[in-house]
């Protein structure tokens, strides 16, 4: 008869409180891990902060959108409806007389073509120059490139009004007054575009560019075949900002150009103002609507790309 020793059993009681130790006997299993669920936002109602944020957005929309809505609706009214008391938001009937009068008073077609041409060419050149400058600051082993980048950042802090007199003197000495190049050339260097592209390029994978270099691709090919396709949101953001700035630019074209055939739409609105101050507000509102709506529609369509491009590489040093 063979005697078998009984297996030792653990007499340690399981922990009953947060201060007790887990069982350590031979038959004890792995200690149970107690997971505490953190209270999340799921299942919670809207907080006071959320309500305040929505209220702020609604208030900002009303404050910014009401004048634009009034401008569009007033441009569709008859001239006698603009001066009625009390004011009425909606026109009694859609009337395009103000638009026809504005088209007869100033060359709207020529002004529109000038604005479109200068905006497209200026924004394209700003994006191209910003890409090239940022590529040189990141991927080329040039001396003092950090110092150059600091100069770019410093240029962002200088108000553009400071450079008006030197630029005007230079443009006048070159004989570029009343010319398209006189409007475009002084503003082609974009410190904002160079800064944003440089921050984005620092986040790109170096392995892709190193592989392209091993395959014999030069800097020009690496820029346009690899860097540009990986920088779509940033290019869209810089391009949209450049388009808005070029379209809305008023002070510099106003100083350089006094020929109506070379004016842009914002500058051309000054042709509708009378010397004695008695303006036709219907014509002014109609012309202002034509200036505002195109760029507003472009911004609304591309606003998501603008946000994505501005946040790309925002935390890169």
Image: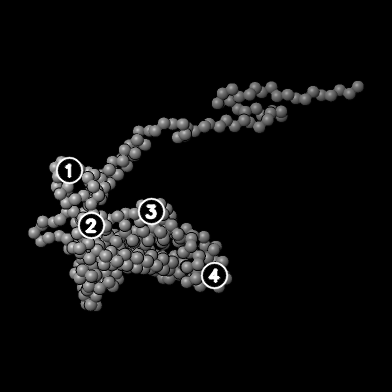
Residue shown at the point (29%, 69%) measured from the top left: 184
Of the two numbered discs 3 and 2 in the rendering, the one whose residue sits closer to the viewer: 2
Q: Residues within 10 Å of mark 4 (few under 14, many from 20)?
A: some
Separation of residues labelled 4 and 3 (CA atoms): 37 Å
Residue shown at the point (27%, 43%) measured from the top left: 62
Residue 99, numbered label: 2
Residue 87, numbered label: 1
Residue 301, numbered label: 3
Which is more N-terminal, label 2 or label 3? 2
User: Is the residue 274 above or below the residue 86 in the image?
Assistant: below
Separation of residues labelled 1 and 3 (CA atoms): 32 Å
Which is more N-terminal, label 2 or label 4? 2
Which is more N-terminal, label 1 or label 2? 1
Q: Position of residue 136 (x, y in %)?
A: 43, 68
Q: Residue tagged by mark 4?
A: 213
Separation of residues labelled 3 and 2 (CA atoms): 25 Å
Residue shown at the point (16%, 51%) measured from the top left: 79
Q: Looking at this view, name the residue that lies furthest to the bottom.
A: 174
Q: Position of residue 281 (x, y in %)?
A: 17, 54
- CB atoms at circles 2 and 1 under 8 Å apart? no
Disc 2 is placed on an element classified as: helix
Q: Position of residue 240 (x, y in %)?
A: 36, 58
Q: Residues within 10 Å of mark 1 (few under 14, many from 20)?
A: few
Q: Residues within 10 Å of mark 2 (few under 14, many from 20)?
A: many
Q: Is residue 74 left or right of residue 225?
A: left
């Amino acid at each position: 008869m063979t005697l078998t020793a009984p297996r030792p059993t653990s007499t340690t009681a399981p922990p009953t409180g947060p201060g007790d130790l887990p069982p350590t006997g031979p038959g004890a299993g792995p200690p149970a891990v107690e997971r505490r669920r953190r209270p999340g936002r799921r299942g919670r109602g809207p907080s006071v902060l959320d309500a305040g944020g929505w209220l702020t957005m609604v208030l900002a929309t009303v404050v910014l959108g009401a004048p634009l809505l009034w401008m569009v609706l007033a441009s569709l009214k008859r001239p006698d409806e603009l001066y009625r008391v009390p004011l009425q938001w909606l026109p009694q009937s859609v009337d395009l007389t103000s638009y026809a009068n504005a088209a007869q008073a100033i060359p709207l077609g020529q002004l529109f073509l000038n604005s479109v041409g200068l905006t497209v060419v200026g924004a394209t050149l700003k994006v191209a120059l910003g890409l090239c400058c940022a590529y040189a600051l990141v991927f080329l082993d040039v001396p003092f490139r950090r110092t150059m980048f600091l100069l770019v950042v410093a240029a962002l802090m200088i108000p553009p009004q400071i450079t008006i007199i030197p630029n005007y003197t230079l443009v006048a000495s070159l004989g570029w007054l009343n010319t398209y190049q006189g409007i475009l050339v002084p503003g082609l260097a974009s410190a904002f575009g160079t800064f944003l592209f440089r921050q984005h390029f620092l986040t790109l994978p170096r392995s892709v560019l190193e592989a392209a270099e091993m395959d014999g691709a030069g800097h020009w090919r690496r820029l346009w075949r690899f860097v540009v396709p990986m920088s779509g949101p940033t290019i869209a953001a810089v391009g949209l900002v450049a388009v808005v700035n070029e379209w809305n630019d008023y002070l510099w074209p106003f100083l350089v150009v006094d020929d109506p055939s070379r004016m842009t739409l914002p500058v051309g609105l000054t042709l509708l103002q009378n010397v004695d101050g008695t303006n036709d507000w219907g014509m002014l509102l109609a012309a202002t609507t034509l200036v505002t709506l195109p760029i507003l529609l472009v911004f609304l369509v591309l606003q998501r790309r603008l946000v994505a491009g501005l946040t790309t590489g925002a935390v890169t040093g």
